[in-house]
Amino acid sequence: MVNIGKQIEYWKSSADSNIETAEILLTNGKFIEALFFCHLAIEKSLKACYVKYNNELAPKIHKLQYLAESSGVELNEGQKDFFGVLMQYQIEGRYPETYPPYPMEQDAIKLLNETKQTLQWLMKKL
């Protein structure tokens, strides 16, 4: 039997680690990589929500809006737009033919801050 509490704690801890990594990468001028880790942090916090809401292991997918919807997390339009932006830096960022546009530093900082706010909001749901 799966220990749901342990699963939730794993995803929360991993999300915290990923946002710290995003901050380090951004500080070192690695903006695309920082945004990739922003996506991971949100993904993992949503997986914690999924585990709590569904009382089962999280699916092995990366689509933020799907994870939110299947976790009972209601998003406003701004959050949906934000998730869409982060998705550019997830899978698409791994392949040269679909490499996302390189963000300016101020844009990367804005997205990191929005990620942190969203993480706080999601963690309150756990």
Image (spheres, grey):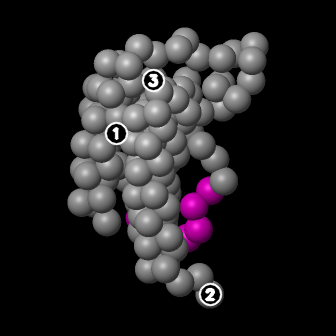
The residue that disc 2 covers is: 1
What amino acid type is highlighted by mark number 3? Val
Q: CA distance from mark 2 to mark 3?
A: 37 Å
Q: Give the mark toward the camera: 2 or 3.
A: 3
Instruction: Where is residue 61? Give x, y as percent.
Output: 63, 47
Task: Give the residue at the far front of this rendering.
Answer: 28
**Main secondary structure along the magenta-highlighted residues:** loop
Residue at (49, 61) in percent of width and height: 14
Compared with 61, 89 (above or below) is above
Q: Looking at this view, is 57 or 100 the one in front?
A: 100
What amino acid type is highlighted by mark number 2? Met
Badge 1 marks a residue whose secondary structure is helix
Residue 39 in view, yes or no: no
Instruction: Where is residue 35? Give x, y as percent.
Output: 48, 32
Please state the extent of the stretch shown in magenta in the rendering. Answer: 53-59
Residue 111 in view, yes or no: yes
Badge 2 marks a residue whose secondary structure is loop
